[in-house]
Image: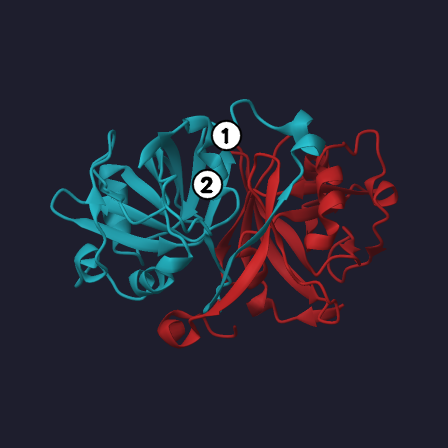
Chain colours: A cyan, B red
Amino acid sequence: MKTLQLSKAFTLLEPGPVVLVTTHDGKKNNVMTISWTMVVDFTPVFAITTGPWNHSFAALRKTKQCVIAIPTVDLLDKVVGIGTCSGTDTDKFEKFALTPVPGKHVKAPLIKQCLANIECKVIDFNRKHSIVILEGVAAWFDAARKEKRMLHAVGDGTFIADGRKLDRRKMMRSKLPAGV
Amino acid sequence: MKTLQLSKAFTLLEPGPVVLVTTHDGKKNNVMTISWTMVVDFTPVFAITTGPWNHSFAALRKTKQCVIAIPTVDLLDKVVGIGTCSGTDTDKFEKFALTPVPGKHVKAPLIKQCLANIECKVIDFNRKHSIVILEGVAAWFDAARKEKRMLHAVGDGTFIADGRKLDRRKMMRSKLPAGV
């Protein structure tokens, strides 16, 4: 996994993939499946919706750190499995054979099996709507990985894999931020 | 276009498609392309990131109403075109040959050419992060439409079309909300 320019990190979340969010509560690693995410700024800043109903939320609030890991199609059963059990009684890294890799800026682990990882710090929390605001502080991308199709959760138990790529860079040139 | 149960409306945005957001400022219709969206609650509640840099924002703040319209792959050039010009000097419904259809609960128009439309009311605004919180009040779906693949913006001028559908309903049964 190599570093990805931070100015490009928003392009990992802008397509709306389902993601894994890791935390480290001081004692152990945990991971949750999240599909309610949004880019908020190119710098990058992200929003995720989560709350006390997720076991990871306590660690997120306490440590103010997490990693957003981007899984691909081949990891679908792990993604669903992680989303349907709880860190209260399960070591999910062990159960789903995920390899934690130390990050540079946060104690939450990167996930080796994922296509990309973004180290994040919590910079704000909107309690009313359970929206956590994250600043990306480092990004990693596994360019050597063959399967690069991301997954999109529909919310009804079905998922959509990335399909055809369409290029409109020329048309959009005037609107693209610097560094992408 | 037929009504879609409101309990299913979140499944239109959860996969992370690029969307068109329409407004009506009391005089005319406008529309913007947005890919920074997030589901916040199943009820449904959505978040979008927008601010004064979008001409539509003034109408959104004033009327507290909008429609989130979901375009499909065949509409890509309209989506990009809408995102690269401004309502300050352009009638985008006319320029992009979009047909406005009256909604039931809001004055912002549905877009006939889109796969789905969600009528929304603004229920909150987080000024610090430019996040507008919307409550969906009615949803519409064009089941007769042949092309149903949504588009995902990468943010670098490229887009990804929906690919293969993967079914994990059995595995996820315990976690699915009622009514999807």
Q: Position of residue B39 (x, y in %)?
A: 51, 54
Q: Position of residue B177 (x, y in %)?
A: 45, 70
Name which quarter of the figure residue B140 lies in.
Answer: bottom right
Residue drawn at 74 percent across, 67 percent down: B145
Task: Report the chain holding disc 1.
Answer: A
Compared to residue B172, the image places residue B64 above or below, namely: above
Q: Which mark is residue A86?
A: none
Q: Secondary structure at mark 1?
A: loop
Residue A137 in view (yes/no)? no
Observer-side mark, 2 or 1, equals: 2
Q: Nearer the viewer, residue B58 or B2?
A: B2
Compared to residue B68, the image places residue B88 above or below, namely: above
In 3D space, how far apart are the residues under numbered discs 2 and 1 (Cα atoms)? 11 Å
Q: Which residue is mark 1?
A: A42
Q: Position of residue B122 (x, y in %)?
A: 62, 48
Task: Report the chain holding disc 2.
Answer: A
Q: Earlier in the sequence, mark 2 or mark 1?
A: 2
Q: Which residue is mark 2?
A: A12
Q: Secondary structure at mark 2?
A: helix
Q: Amino acid at mark 2?
A: Leu
- B71 with respect to A55 (left or right): right
Residue drawn at 18 percent across, 62 percent down: A90
Q: Residues within 10 Å of mark 1 (few under 14, many from 20)?
A: many
Q: Quadrant of the N terminus of chain A?
A: top left
Q: Nearer the viewer, residue A116 or A109?
A: A116
Q: Amino acid at mark 1?
A: Phe
Compared to residue A28, the image places residue A94 above or below, namely: below
Query: Do the residues indicated by labels 2 and 1 lie within the same chain of the protein?
Result: yes
- B6 with respect to B63 (left or right): left
Residue A14 in view (yes/no)? yes
